[in-house]
Image (cartoon, rainbow, N blue to C red):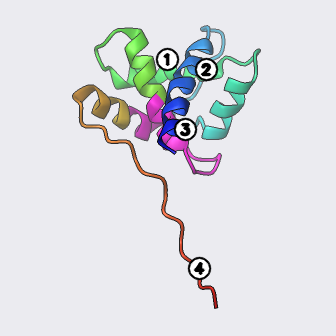
Amino acid sequence: MASRTLSALLLLPVLALAACGSKTKDVNTAAYTCAQFTKSLAAKSDDTAGNYINGLRKQANLGQDPKTERRELTVGIFFACRNKPGTTTPATTAVASAKAIKNGKFHIPGAPKSSKKSSK
């Protein structure tokens, strides 16, 4: 289980950095959803995920090199969208997570606990 989480954490920044887009299409960071982010990562011609990350970088104002900021925000987006519906807007959670990572206070959230059902 831990190795899957670790491999997902290592894979996601690579995909997001590959999609760090051009300045051709502005993205409304407040309204951008998890479904749009995932769809953009899956499509070669859609670079809005990269534009979204760059927009969040400007909002977060982390004061680090761009590559580190992108990685921290990508991890924040990943955990903000994990096990959530596609309509979730991860911007505020991702920025808060990136700031916590920068300050060394970020703890990886556990998987949601499944509710036990009665066997009767």
Q: CA distance from mark 1 to mark 3?
A: 27 Å
Q: Inspect the magenta stretch and tell me whether residue 94 lies in it.
A: yes
- Nearest to N terminus: mark 2 or mark 3: 3
Extent of the magenta region = 75-95
Residue 100 position, x and y percent, is: 29, 34
Residue count near mark 1 (Cα–Cα under 10 Å), binned few <14, some 14–19, many ≥20 = many
The residue singled out by tag 2 in the image is 15
- Nearest to N terminus: mark 2 or mark 1: 2
Closer to viewer: mark 2 or mark 3: 3
| Image side of residue 105 versus residue 68, left or right | left
Q: Residue at x 24, y 31 (%)?
A: 104
Residue count near mark 4 (Cα–Cα under 10 Å), binned few <14, some 14–19, many ≥20 = few
Q: CA distance from mark 2 to mark 3?
A: 16 Å
The residue singled out by tag 1 in the image is 54
Q: Residue at x 50, y 37 (%)?
A: 3
The residue singled out by tag 4 in the image is 117
Amino acid type, callout 3: Arg
Residue 14 position, x and y percent, is: 56, 18
Considering the numbered disc 4 on the image, is that residue within a helix, a strand or a loop?
A: loop
| Image side of residue 10 versus residue 117, left or right | left
Q: CA distance from mark 4 to mark 3?
A: 26 Å
Considering the numbered disc 3 on the image, is that residue within a helix, a strand or a loop?
A: helix
Marks 2 and 3 in Cβ contact (< 8 Å): no
- Nearest to N terminus: mark 2 or mark 4: 2
Q: CA distance from mark 4 to mark 1?
A: 43 Å
Q: Quadrant of the C terminus?
A: bottom right
